[in-house]
Amino acid sequence: MKMTATIVFIYGLLVLLGGIAGYVAAASIPSLVAGLACGLVLMGLAIAVSKGSLYSQYFALAFTFLLDGFFTYRFAKTLHFFPAGFMSLLSLVVLIVIALKIRKTLKMC
């Protein structure tokens, strides 16, 4: 449980920092707001996951899935690996980690 929470927390931190970097590089207010909001949501979910909440694992899975869809769309539109392609790949890895954790949790029940 701690490993999954740590991974989700680091992912949230990277999303948050990506929003700040987008603001600094392009003065993009939407990038800043979205990065901060999504990053803080993911870090909050990581704390809930570390406490053992199954619902927070499902919500983290759904939220990561939506972010992966967004980053994949941006990568397909721009064809620039960084940042959209990298974040899409990272989102997919986090998505797999969370799904495997949920599967393991459900097998234990």
Image: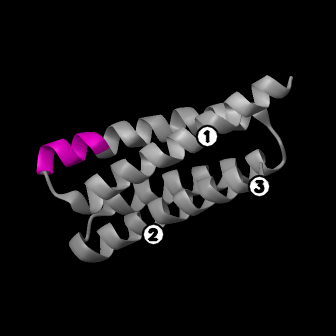
Query: Any mark on residue 17, and which?
Result: 2
Question: Dividing the image into 4 quarters, which one contains the C terminus?
Answer: top right
**What residue is rendered at 54% in x and 64% in y?**
13
Q: Main secondary structure of the magenta part?
A: helix
Dot 1 and dot 3 residues touching (CB under 8 Å): no
Of circles 2 and 1, the one toward us is: 1
| Residue 101 pos. (x, y %) | 68, 38
| Residue 37 pos. (x, y %) | 51, 54
**What residue is rendered at 61% in x and 53% in y?**
8
Q: In the depicted view, which residue is nearer to us: 42 or 2?
A: 2
Dot 2 and dot 3 residues touching (CB under 8 Å): no
Circle 3 packing at 10 Å, graded few (<14), some (14-19), many (20+), is few
| Residue 28 pos. (x, y %) | 27, 64
**What residue is rendered at 57% in x and 35% in y?**
61
- Mark pair 1, 3: CA separation: 12 Å
- Mark pair 2, 3: CA separation: 22 Å
Question: Is residue 85 found left or right of 80 in the rendered image?
Answer: right
Say whether residue 87 is magenta.
Answer: no
The amino acid at mark 2 is Leu
Tally the marks. Answer: 3
Query: Any mark on residue 75, and which?
Result: none
The amino acid at mark 3 is Lys
Image-quadrant location for residue 105: top right
**Which residue corresponds to mark 1?**
98
Element assignment for label 1: helix
Element assignment for label 3: helix
- First to last magenta residue range: 72-78
The amino acid at mark 1 is Ile
**Which residue corresponds to mark 3?**
2
| Residue 19 pos. (x, y %) | 39, 64
- The correct choice, above or below, for 1 with respect to 82 in the image is above
